[in-house]
């Protein structure tokens, strides 16, 4: 604990401490207790998470301070450690019947945190709450996304599952969400998409679930449900405010500037219309953003959203791979958020290496580099969009892999319904 607070610079020698008959913990605790009460929050908020959790046991006033919602929010704002959460599923492979992933020969999955810096070295392995695996219908969870240190997990990799979890690996706590009301048994076949965002006005975390129903009279009927962590329950947004569209569960969502963003598709008699569906987390209203008009929409494309490197706007990866030699990966950034005219193409990548395979893009790092995965080997590499240089990271993904930005926080520490492990 002393090392955590003073970076190993002891103010007392071991001999003097021994003479006093006090442990290091006793010394620092007594010292903090002697300080003016109004200074305690300012000191506690600068401590590492492990020390902070231990200090909840010192006395009731400290526990109340640390678990106060305002302290929890301020701690996340002031102590952000920029990391990357890597989830890798080891299996023999997968296939996509009717657009859903089915895992073949599942072996295990693992979570780890990497530094979001030049080296992208390992920060730590992440211990998963094993008890959650007992509730699964599918072999493992899917990482839907992250927000302020929370990870949204969904049991929907293949078969319909209704277990959703908000997990904070930094403090080893999680909350299992109640089951939503739209099930296969109640509404027939559907495709569901999820998103996790933060409502800064009410200091609340919300999960949005969009379910596109296939067995209804309408060609494409989408229902929207919102779970509030503060209220602990789901609600249906009525009347249905969702533009009639299809949002695939395989498409990544992005949370930026208080809104969730998904890639969405509208069908016409002639072609498919791609656009970005948005959801204002605080106002609980939907909207639309246009895509760049420069790339072709008359052929199947793999479109993936990301937060931009500066975390102020959104980016778009446009991947097209065919057998006629016209394969490419475009990297776009919306320079000014919500200004469709500011879409800018940063680079066009062609198939790489002797195998002439097209990389798969995951996300932007804070440096502005893009994390890619090489097809076949699943090796992760970093690509500098300015210098056009590739950097091998010495990290492998897998047939099923997710890469998300992550920041340590103490969100869920103040909740009595959060399970510990």
Image (tube, rainbow, N blue to C red):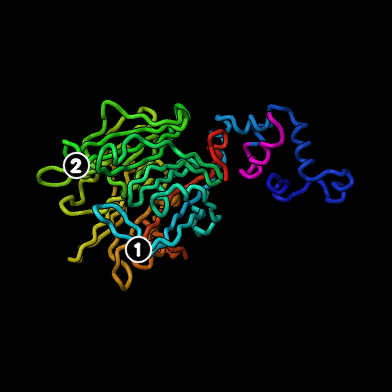
| Marks 1 and 2, the one that precedes in the sequence | 1
Q: Residue at x 44, y 65 (%)?
A: 392
Above or below: residue 126 compared with residue 180: below
In the image, residue 189 lies at what x, y percent? 25, 43
| Residue furthest right as drawn | 19
Q: Nearer the viewer, residue 106 or 32?
A: 106
Residue at the outermost bottom position: 354
- Percent position of residue 271, x then y: 13, 47
- Which stretch did the figure color magenta? 45-60
- Mark 1 or 2, closer to the camera: 1
Q: Could you say where residue 127 lies in the image, as x and y percent from the top left? A: 54, 52
**Residue 363: numbered disc:** none
Quick check: is 343 in the magenta stretch?
no
Q: Is residue 210 left or right of residue 369?
A: left
Residue carrying label 2: 266
The label on residue 93 is 1
Q: Are the residues flagged by discs 1 and 2 in contact, CB closer than 8 Å?
A: no
Of the pair 30 and 208, the residue shown nearer to us: 208
Q: Pick the residue in front: 273 or 385.
A: 273
Residue 103 seen by the camera: yes
Q: Is residue 397 visible?
A: no
Residue shown at the point (29%, 69%) measured from the top left: 356
Element type where label 1 sits in the image: strand
**Front residue of 217 and 198:** 217
């Amino acid at each position: 604990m002393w090392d955590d607070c003073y970076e190993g610079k002891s103010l007392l020698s071991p001999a003097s401490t021994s003479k006093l008959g006090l442990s290091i913990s006793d010394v620092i605790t007594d010292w903090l207790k002697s300080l003016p009460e109004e200074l305690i929050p300012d000191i506690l908020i600068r401590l590492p998470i492990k020390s902070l959790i231990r200090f909840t046991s010192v006395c009731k006033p400290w526990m109340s301070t640390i678990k106060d919602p305002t302290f929890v929010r301020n701690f996340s704002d002031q102590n952000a450690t920029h990391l990357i959460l890597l989830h890798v599923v080891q299996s023999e492979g997968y296939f996509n019947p009717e657009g859903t992933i089915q895992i073949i020969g599942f072996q295990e999955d693992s979570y780890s945190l990497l530094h979001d810096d030049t080296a992208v070295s390992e920060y730590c392995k992440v211990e998963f709450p094993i008890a959650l695996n007992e509730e699964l219908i599918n072999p493992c969870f899917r990482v839907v996304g992250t927000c302020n240190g929370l990870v949204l997990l969904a049991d929907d990799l293949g078969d319909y599952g209704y277990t959703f979890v908000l997990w904070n690996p930094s403090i080893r706590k999680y909350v299992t969400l109640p089951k939503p009301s739209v099930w296969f048994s109640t509404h027939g076949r559907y495709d569901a998409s999820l998103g996790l965002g933060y409502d800064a006005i009410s200091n609340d975390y919300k999960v949005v679930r969009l379910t596109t129903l296939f067995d209804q009279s309408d060609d494409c009927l989408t229902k929207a449900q919102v779970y509030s962590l503060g209220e602990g329950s789901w609600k249906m947004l009525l009347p249905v405010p969702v533009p009639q569209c299809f949002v695939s569960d395989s498409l990544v969502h992005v949370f930026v500037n208080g809104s969730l963003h998904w890639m969405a598709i509208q069908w016409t008699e002639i072609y498919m219309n791609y656009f970005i569906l948005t959801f204002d987390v605080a106002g609980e209203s939907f909207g639309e953003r246009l895509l760049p008009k420069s790339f072709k929409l008359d052929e199947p494309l793999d479109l993936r959203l990301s937060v931009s490197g500066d975390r102020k706007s959104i980016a778009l990866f446009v991947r097209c791979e065919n057998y006629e030699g016209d394969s490419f990966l475009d990297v776009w950034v919306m320079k000014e958020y919500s200004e469709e005219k500011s879409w800018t193409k940063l680079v066009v990548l062609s198939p790489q290496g002797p195998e002439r395979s097209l990389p798969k893009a995951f996300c932007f790092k804070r440096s502005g580099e893009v994390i890619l995965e090489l097809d076949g080997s699943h090796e992760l590499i970093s690509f500098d969009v300015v210098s056009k240089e590739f950097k091998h990271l010495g990290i492998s993904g897998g047939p099923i892999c997710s890469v998300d930005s992550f920041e340590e926080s103490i969100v869920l520490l103040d909740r009595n319904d959060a399970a510990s492990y």
